[in-house]
Amino acid sequence: MVLSIIKALNATVAFALELATLVAVGYWPFTWEQTTAIRTFSALGLVAVMASVWGTFGSPGSSLTGVTRIVFEVFWFGLGIAAVYTTRRPRLAAVFAVVFVVNAVLARVLHQIS
């Protein structure tokens, strides 16, 4: 019972991290000193690319497993963490990184991801 609750909470945190990555990457262009149109289209384009990449390689049931999956997740969530950091929020980026690492370790220990 307790284990199933922990697994459900960890899966919820994983989903929140995925959404937070997309939000961070989408927000990042609005910190640029460019026209509103360039910032808006850049944000839309980056989010579309990131969502497509996650849907192809990161979603449950994707073909990535083992070390390849870990490398992909570090890269993908690392982009979100870097986006937060570049918006002059280093503490928030550090929290994001810690939550990601704890979630990833728990996902492997609890056999939520192969």
Image (tube, rainbow, N blue to C red):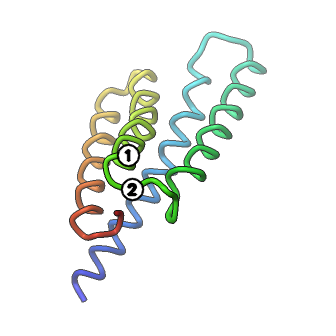
Give x and y (percent) for residue 78. 39, 34
Question: Which residue is tagged 2?
Answer: 65
Seen in the picture, residue 101 relative to 16 is either above or below; the reply is above
- Residue 22 percent coordinates (x, y): 55, 42
Label 1 packing within 10 angstroms: few (<14), some (14-19), many (20+): few
Q: Residue at x 48, y 46 (%)?
A: 20
Q: In the orientation shown, which residue stands out farthest toward the right?
A: 37
Percent of width and height locating residue 3 = 23, 81
Label 1 sits on a secondary structure element that is: helix
Q: Residue at x 46, y 59 (%)?
A: 15
Pointer 1 residue: 68
Across the whole image, how many numbered discs are drawn on residues? Answer: 2
Q: CA distance from mark 2 to mark 1?
A: 6 Å
Residue 26 in percent (x, y) is at 60, 35
Q: Between residues 42 and 89, which one lies in front from this camera angle?
A: 42
Mark 2 near mark 1, Cβ–Cβ under 8 Å? Answer: yes
29 or 60: nearer the viewer: 60
Extreme residue toward the top, this view: 33
Q: Amino acid at mark 2?
A: Thr
Quadrant in the rendering for residue 37: top right
> Where the N terminus falls, by quadrant?
bottom left
At horizontal 29% and vertical 31% (from top left) the residue drawn is 91
Q: Secondary structure at mark 2?
A: loop
Q: Examine the rendered structure and indicate whether residue 75 appears above or below residue 31.
A: below
